[in-house]
């Protein structure tokens, strides 16, 4: 038996999944503007070599931009600034799981109006070893949610 429910709401719900993939330490496929509501995202890691990435949705406080996230993430692991700066940003809807090369993760998020970004604080290098947080290397994408 399947139970389906519906309710009235001013916010919209996306019926199609938005596929976002990462390649060369950049997010691709993420719209710059979304309508407020429930959205399904498919996050795919399409790097050519073995590496783990993540897609962490964060709220951007008034006056902050993706560049502020990038600047905060530059530096050594577990340091602020550095990879430890992840906890300085408000996560929205929890964390998408990490995805190794060739893997994908599906997530549903309710997004109210506001300014957001997605970022990766993983620290691996292509092909192995550790390095700076990927967000500090520019792996951050800013977007806006409208009513």
Image (spheres, rainbow, N blue to C red):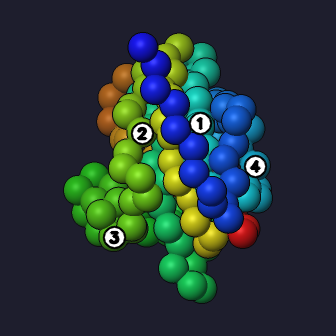
Question: Residue 8's x, y, as percent?
Answer: 62, 56
- The number of numbered discs placed on residues in the rendered structure image is 4
Query: CB atoms at circles 2 and 3 under 8 Å apart?
Result: no
Question: Residue 88's x, y, as percent?
Answer: 33, 70
Residue 31's tag is 4
Judge whether 145 appears above or below 7 on screen. Answer: below
- Along the polypeptide, which appears first: circle 2 or circle 1? 1
- Along the polypeptide, which appears first: circle 3 or circle 4? 4
Residue 88's tag is 3
- Along the polypeptide, which appears first: circle 2 or circle 3? 3
- Along the polypeptide, which appears first: circle 4 or circle 1? 4
Foreground disc of the pair 2, 3: 2
Residue 96's tag is 2
Query: CB atoms at circles 2 and 1 under 8 Å apart?
Result: yes
| Image side of residue 83 versus residue 22, left or right | left
Foreground disc of the pair 3, 4: 4
Residue name at image x 57 percent, y 85 percent: 62
Question: Residue 136's x, y, as percent?
Answer: 49, 56
Question: What is the C-alpha distance between the residues marked 2 and 4?
Answer: 18 Å
Q: Nearer the viewer, residue 147 or 129?
A: 147
Residue name at image x 45 percent, y 49 percent: 56
Query: CB atoms at circles 4 and 1 under 8 Å apart?
Result: no
- Along the polypeptide, which appears first: circle 2 or circle 4? 4
Query: CB atoms at circles 2 and 4 under 8 Å apart?
Result: no
- Along the polypeptide, which appears first: circle 3 or circle 1? 1
């Amino acid at each position: 038996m399947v139970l389906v429910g519906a309710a009235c709401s001013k916010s919209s719900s996306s019926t199609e999944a938005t596929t976002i993939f990462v390649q060369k330490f950049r997010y691709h496929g993420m719209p710059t503007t979304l309508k407020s509501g429930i959205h399904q995202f498919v996050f795919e890691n399409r790097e050519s070599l073995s590496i783990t990435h993540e897609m962490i949705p964060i709220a951007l406080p008034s006056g902050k931009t993706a560049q502020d996230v990038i600047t905060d993430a530059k530096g050594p692991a577990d340091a602020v600034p550095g990879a430890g700066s992840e906890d300085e940003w408000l996560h929205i809807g929890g964390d998408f799981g990490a995805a190794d090369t060739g893997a994908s993760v599906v997530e549903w998020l309710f997004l109210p109006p506001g300014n957001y970004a997605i970022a990766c604080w993983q620290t691996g290098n292509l092909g192995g070893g550790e390095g700076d947080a990927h967000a500090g290397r520019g792996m951050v994408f800013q977007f806006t949610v409208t009513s």
